[in-house]
Every structure is written in structure tokens, then in C-alpha cells.
Amino acid sequence: MARIQLAFKVSAPGKVILHGEHSVVYGKPAVAGAVGARNSLIFREQSHDSIDLDYTSISVQHKFAVLEVNKVLEQFSGNENNLDSSDKIESFFKCLIPDNLTDQGRKGLTSTLYLLCGILSQNKIKSISTGFSIKITSELSVGAGLGSSASFGVCLSAAFITYSKCRSVGDLSLDLSPEDKNTISNWAFESEKIMHGTPSGVDNTVCTFGSIVKFTKLKPIEHVDIKRKINILLVDSKVSRSTIKLVKQVAELKQEFPSIVDHMLSAMEEVANHAADLYASDSVDSNCSFEKLKKLFQINNDLLKGIGVSHPKLENIFSIALANGYSSKITGAGGGGYALILLPDSYKEMESFKTLCSDLENAGFSYLETNVGGPGVVVERV
Ligand SMILES: Nc1ncnc2c1ncn2[C@@H]1O[C@H](COP(=O)(O)OP(=O)(O)OP(=O)(O)O)[C@@H](O)[C@H]1O
Ligand SMILES: C[C@@](O)(CCO)CC(=O)[O-]
């Protein structure tokens, strides 16, 4: 009987950090949620012997010969414990990575090969028998603080886990069990290490599980029981920045002024705890809770400014928001990327929202009207 060619679609959301960016790196809780914009991946087995990758957002189209990948997969099995740093991983896969790639392209391909070999080895699959294609498209800007890299890692991990389940035990169901989701999040975390050095793990957790979560490093995830999604406006500062550099910059400030920065990180923890309670309360859209949340946004943003992760373009967005009566903050690493403006439930009818949008446009900013709290990773038929 002819072997069925596998074909499926995976999608995973980007994330926003509502509270706790940077402080999460130091063991404090972060409150983060899935945004409406997603990465989508189409996986198709094919009759020719190559693995064809098409990553539109980073302009990478590349074909690996299955034979070459199988050789690397063979060397990988049994050797995985030695690959305990991103430098070692990069040098292990270097033989398959073309020289003429951008940094983004190199990291994207290295991460793909690492996840493929890691997940196949974990499932005792010793070789790939037919080629396949993977095409990833995205509604998320890369490098803007929306967790595009974590969502990318989650999509790839879910694709390779689905492929492995089908090829090792013939499971064609495409359903993801809670255990599968934990495995996906753990592998996406490994991919995040290649992208970002020392990630906290919040991004891959949210992009896998969706909704809103309270995340503290090395502790079980707490799912925040939200009653409705939170409306937000994401405003693009159009300033690119590097998460690694900003995390390092905060570490240096903490080293220079430990007691001051420690107090600020503890204050961020208090903000995150208070806000998580408000998101979980029935009345998050009641005036009183919403006004409290607005104040917490403002306090959180002032603390982030205090640790030096703002940017003049972000400040411009914050002033426009405030002038129209809205609270806003940095989200993610800061230094550029997106600013997050909190919107009330009835924002669409509000005159002040229309003015806010036209003021942002007049100042040259583009924005994305979305919400926080949607679904995490999903695998479905194509
Ligand atoms: N949609 C995508 N398609 C392919 N590769 C991607 C995609 N998104 C991210 N990547 C890979 O992830 C790498 C790191 O992404 P980067 O840190 O710039 O963005 P980010 O994840 O959006 O930022 P943050 O983690 O602060 O939210 C990129 O260099 C690229 O290799
Ligand atoms: C700045 C930071 O807290 C958020 C990046 O999205 C870093 C991290 O959590 O890994």
C-alpha cells in the first residue's frame, strides 16, 4: 500500500508581556498573554529527497539534501549532551549552513536543524525516509518584542513532534496532549537559547499554551483564569533592538547599583501580582478595576524607564497615549519595538480612541488593534 504523505498546518501566537519584562529574568513573576497575530507553518511530505524551507519573514529559501541531514542526525544521536551551549550547537551544524546568510537566516536554519535532530532522536527516529517542505508565514514583525522567535520555535517543535508521532507510532490524529505541549514548550525554549542567549522561558510558554499566564522561572506555570480577552493597541516604534543587548544592559545597571535595581525589580513583582489578580477578577472591565489597571500600567512603565529600557520614539508614543487619556507601556525587552496601549471594552465607540489613532498616524506610527488571551499552538489538517 502506498504510504500516506503527511500534510498539516501548525500555528502559534506571538506574545505580549503585560507585566514583568526584565524582572522575570531575575526570578520575579511575569504576566504575559497570547496576541491575536500568529505564525503559520505548512508541513508537506514530498516525493523528492530534499527538505525545502521557505521562511518569508527572514527571506530564507533553502533546500537540504535528506542524505546530508541523515548523516548529521546519525552523529547527533548519542552526542546531544555535549551540545550544551549555543556556540557548540552552531559549530555542530555549521557544515550544513551556507556562508552567505544573514545572522537571522543562520540562526533560523541552525535552530531548525537542532529542533529536527533533537526531536527525532528523542523519538528514536534514526533517519528521515522522504523529503518534506516547510513554509512559514507570519503576521508578526520579527525583532519587535512580540515573541516572533518563540512562536517560530513553537511552530517548528509542534511540526517535528507531530511528524515523529506519525512516523514512529503511526499516530495520525494531530491532537496535542498536555504532555505534547510541555515537550513543545521545552524544545522551543532550547531554540530561544540559540536566538537570545539566556531567555527566561516566558515567551515559549505563552506561545505554546496561549491565554494569559503568570510565569516565574523554575516554577510551575500559573494559568490566569481570565473572563474575557484584554483589548490592546500595539504601536510600532519602528526602532529595531536586540533583546540580548537590552538584557545585558539591565544586568550591568544591576551590577553597578544592586540595591536600587533590586528594589525596582521587587516593585515590578508587586505590580505583576496585583495586575494578575485584576485580570482574573470578574470585573476587569468595571471602571474601578480598569482605572486600577491603568495606574499599574503607568507604574510598570515608569519602573522600566528607570532601568533604562525606553527610547525617545517610545516616549513619543507614551505622550500621545497619555494626552488622550490612555495608559501605555513598553512590552518585551524595550529599547524600541512595540509599545502597548491598554484599551477599555467599549473603546471602539469612544471619540478619544479615534483621536488617539489619528494622533499616532500623524506622528508617523503604525499600529495593530488586537487582544490578549487567545489560543496557543494548534495543529490542523490542510
Ligand atoms: N517568522 C519567522 N520566520 C523565520 N524565522 C524567524 C521568524 N521570527 C523569528 N525568527 C528567527 O528568530 C530570530 C530572533 O528573532 P528576534 O529576537 O529578532 O525577534 P523576536 O522574537 O520578535 O523578539 P522578542 O523575543 O524580543 O519578542 C530571528 O533572527 C530569526 O532567525
Ligand atoms: C526582556 C525579557 O524579559 C522579555 C523578552 O520578551 C527577556 C526574557 O524574558 O527572556
Image (cartoon, rainbow, N blue to C red):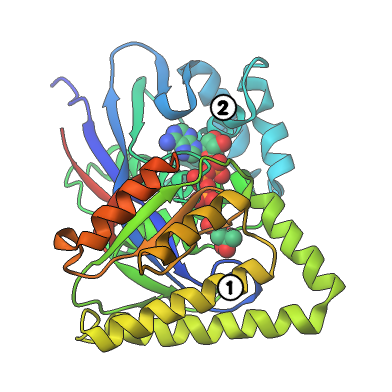
Q: What residue did someone put label 2 on? A: 105
Quadrant of the snapshot with the N terminus: top left
Q: At x 43% / y 66%, what residue is drawn?
A: 322
Indicate whether 67 appears above or below 115.
above
Q: At x 34% / y 26%, what residue is drawn?
A: 135
Indicate whether 4 appears above or below 215.
above
Q: What residue did someone put label 1 on? A: 302
Q: At x 58% / y 31%, what residue is drawn?
A: 104
The residue carrying mark 1 has its beta carbon less than 8 Å from ligand 2? no
Q: Residues within 10 Å of mark 2 (few under 14, many from 20)?
A: many
Side of 26 where 269 appears, left or right: left
Residue 256 in percent (x, y) is at: 86, 71
Q: Label 1's element?
A: helix
Quadrant of the snapshot with the C terminus: top left
Q: Mark 2 or mark 1: which is in front?
A: 1
Separation of residues labelled 2 and 1 (CA atoms): 35 Å
The residue carrying mark 2 has its beta carbon less than 8 Å from ligand 1? yes
Residue 106 in percent (x, y) is at: 61, 28
Residue 201 in percent (x, y) is at: 53, 62
Evaluate whether residue 204 shows in this view: no
Q: Earlier in the sequence, mark 2 or mark 1?
A: 2
| Residue 288, picture quadrant | bottom left
